[in-house]
Image: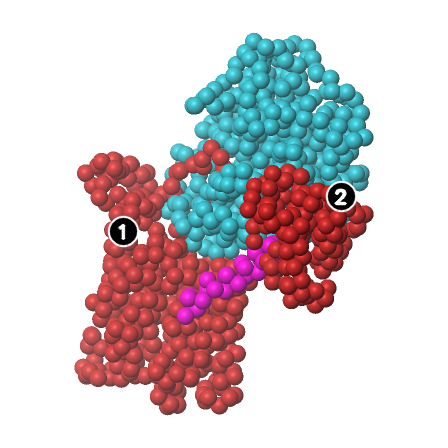
Chain colours: A cyan, B red
Amino acid sequence: MANVIKLSKGLDINLKGKAAAEVVNAKPSKVYGLVPDAFYGVKPKVVVKEGDTVKAGDALFVDKLHPEVKFASPVSGKVTLVERGERRKVLSIQVEADATQQYADFGKGVPADGKAVLETLLASGLFGYMMQRPYAVTACPEDTPKGIFVSAISDMPLAADFEFVVKGQEADFQTGIDALSKVAKVYLGVKPGSALVGTKNAEVTVFKGKCPAGNVGVQINHISPVNKGETVWTMGAEEVIFVGRLFNTGKVDLTRTIAVAGSEVKAPKYVKALVGAKMSDIVGDNLSTEKAVRVIDGNPLTGMKSSLDGFVGAHTTEVTAIPEGNETYELLGWISPRLNEFSVSRSYLSWLMPKKEYTLDTRVKGGHRHMIFSGEYDSVFPMDIYPEQLVKAIIAGDIDRMEALGIYEVAPEDFAVAEFVDSSKVELQRIVREGLDMLRKENA
Amino acid sequence: MAFIKNMLDKMKPTFSEGGKLSAFGSLFDAAETFFYVPSETAKVRGAQIHDAIDSKRSIFFVVIALIPAILFGMWNIGYQHSLAVGCTEECCLLNQFLYGLAVMLPKIVVSYAVGLGIEVAIAQWKKEEVHEGFFVTGMLIPLIVPVNCPLWIIAIATAFAVIFAKEVFGGTGMNIFNPALVTRAFLFFAYPAMMSGDKVWVNAEYMDCINGTVDGYSQATPLGQLAAGEPVSYSAMDTIIGTIPGSIGETSFIAIMIGAVILIWAGIASWKIILSTFAGGALMAFLLRYDGAQNFEWWEQLTVGGFAFGAVFMATDPVTGCRVEAGKWIYGFLIGVMAIIIRVLNPGFPEGMMLAILLMNVFAPLIDYCFVQANINKRMKRAKVVNLREDAISESENSSLDVDNMSLEDVLKLMFEKAITTTDSALQTNDPMISGVMAFNAIGKTYSYLKEKDKIDQFINLFGISESSYLNALDNVMNQVGKDNISNWDELMHSKQEELPGGIDAFDD
């Protein structure tokens, strides 16, 4: 039987507009765009020219430092635009889709040898979906990871429920795990009562607890913490299905079942769409137009502000829409009961209504301060790390202390709930990202 | 209420950068955020939603929790006054309260005006928002001084505390000492006559009650009586309800406990600190009571003087207290213990709470340090063991060994044996250079681990060798490699580096 780990710290934020258990196909986009920024830590080198034709699975760009790490086109068609921003930074590579899709063939069946598996993953561009700790960046194939961690729990607010997404794709998921287990030992985190508890070729651990228990970083911390000098790889659960499809069919099929959710979505549900699809084709006319809306590429805690013109990011499992709220003026907010607001503090009344679903807007709802109240981060940070002290070490730029306090084990997303509850409104995820980048540069 | 918004919007350009009144921008900003929740939205990356709690609300809840103590303190000023002039029967509750209000209000006004004035000026100078922390400090100050404390002294002490206890450290969130207690400490040492004795606890400014004089009326606090070795003339009920002389906010145990309930309910003060402070105080008072040091019921110690007020409102200051959850138990407990020790055993200080909290403010970072360091040591040890095992794996040809399940000592032993055999083969090989470097590397590695872990003595006991024989082994390798080559040793090592298992990092020590 799988190990069970109970986590007491954390916070579930009950937002309005959870996706209903219904899947529809997204409108096919005319143009698909692969955004290099979604693969954090990669220096993109574009290997196609405008006008080239590519098959689904052909590389659009590679990592400048590790050219063997390729990033595959989600569709077959003609490269229409390499969009560049300031200092010629690549913003997106856009491909106009053919009417009938052609796929590059990478051969069926899982090779018996881990090296061969890795080579296929690299050639097909799926290795680019592998992330690593330390530094929470796209993995480097030269490293020998001590394990590959997959979390099948999605407990961020409004996140796509992987238990629902995997239905009908269990075989692909198992094949994906089988293939990864050839490369390194695979650890799978599942929620209690999960159908995935019987997954073979992986060490399955059940995690019981509130958000962010589903974060792979939290799970690593409890199973096998990352020490200085060690590397672990992580892969999103849906990306394991990509790998499974690759070895079952020989094709790169980047179809995701994306949750379109949030209080400003008229009918929240799941949408089948390809990586790189246009936001407007996924959200469509499903968006409420009464007030200013923020479309988020991801969930409201770790996602990124996007727009209907944007492309779905490579690691995105949900697209959410919440009110912008910049035209809201609340009088004497520091003393009013504000029944529609959610808070961990019992100075509000949300603790009396645990079942209520909240419509939260994007306001920060307070002035930025130094850290004043203690224990706030700690109460929602289920890792054996002192989050406040670590963040202070990063702010101070003290590299030795960051290392000592466990920065190798964390990713910005692990601080998302802490950033939410912080009454001093410190931008924790930005600070942690800067700390990781600083350390990566220093250790390079 | 739209007119407030309109008014603020209309005034905003005047106070913004480049406006006529931009010098008062911080003040305007404070007013704007006082009326309206800021409408700033989340950035492109990072959390897109935020909790509705902010520091303003948390801080104002502390002020709300102080209200019972403030109201009772005001009434008690009037009540003590009417006791002094002997007119308790003629004076109704309302009169007593209004009398207290008249005495108290100027103190609050002075404390806020001086403190906030300095804060606003500094915020403007630093081009920051005004932080709301002083709203609590400014309310605490009038509550922890004797009723007869002159306004000008409060003004000086407040200015001193805000500037030297808070702003020089960087403002709210960065200070080391609780500013309200620094105010009191400043008064205590700079104007001792105004802060203790029997003459300062009953207000005699206004003679509105009956004819008669209260000049020179003296009334001792329970702690004053204890310090003087006199029997306490107040019943336990008096001290719990609070109808006794004392600093304005500290007398009523009940009013303070109402505040404690509000703070703990709202999750703003740490219940761990409050509980452990009382536990520490109770234990120490109990010991001293039955040790015979003091003839006063141990539990009454917790109801008199500033103990309860300090435990609930001062020790729980998150900025100056312990920030690690487990440390809060120790922090609070030691405050309780120190407060009672100072009270009972030091005749110079009838009250110990202020000094106990200030003292523990100093030690709070040390308590935090111990807990954080334990976490760091755990992580470092884990990392070191992992690296050591990895080296043992790579150094050992016999890879069938289950290094993962071996003890640290066994791993060291394995590495050392490996080092010895490598040395031996280095002595026999035709290419002494390469194998010599390898052997040196292997020995050097175990040696550097041992040195690092300060385990040389243990090692000697374990394997029955001495440090000098170890060094001899190193010398042998050096000789084998050839003394002539030592001059370009570095160069040679680097040229061979690629061929070596694990590199030559171990030479660094």
Classify mark 2: residues with Cα within 10 Å, few (<14), some (14-19) or many (20+): some
Task: Specify whether B438 is left or right of B4.
Answer: right
Q: Residue at x 50, y 57 (%)?
A: B267
Q: Quadrant of the C terminus of chain A?
A: top right
Which residue is tagged 2? A203
Q: Which residue is mark 1?
A: B122
How far across and down, in percent of the image, does residue A119 sit? Answer: 71, 26
Would residue B357 appear left or right of B143 to someone viewing this image? right
Residue placed at 33% from the left, 73% from the top?
B247
Q: Is residue B395 left or right of residue A342?
A: right
Subunit under mark 1: B
| Amino acid type at image mark 1 | Ile
Question: How far across and how far down the image is residue A160, in percent?
Answer: 64, 34
Which of the 4 image quadrants contains residue A230?
A: top right
Mark 2 residue type: Glu
Query: Is B168 in the magenta?
Result: no
Q: Which mark is residue B10?
A: none
The span picked out in magenta is: B359-381
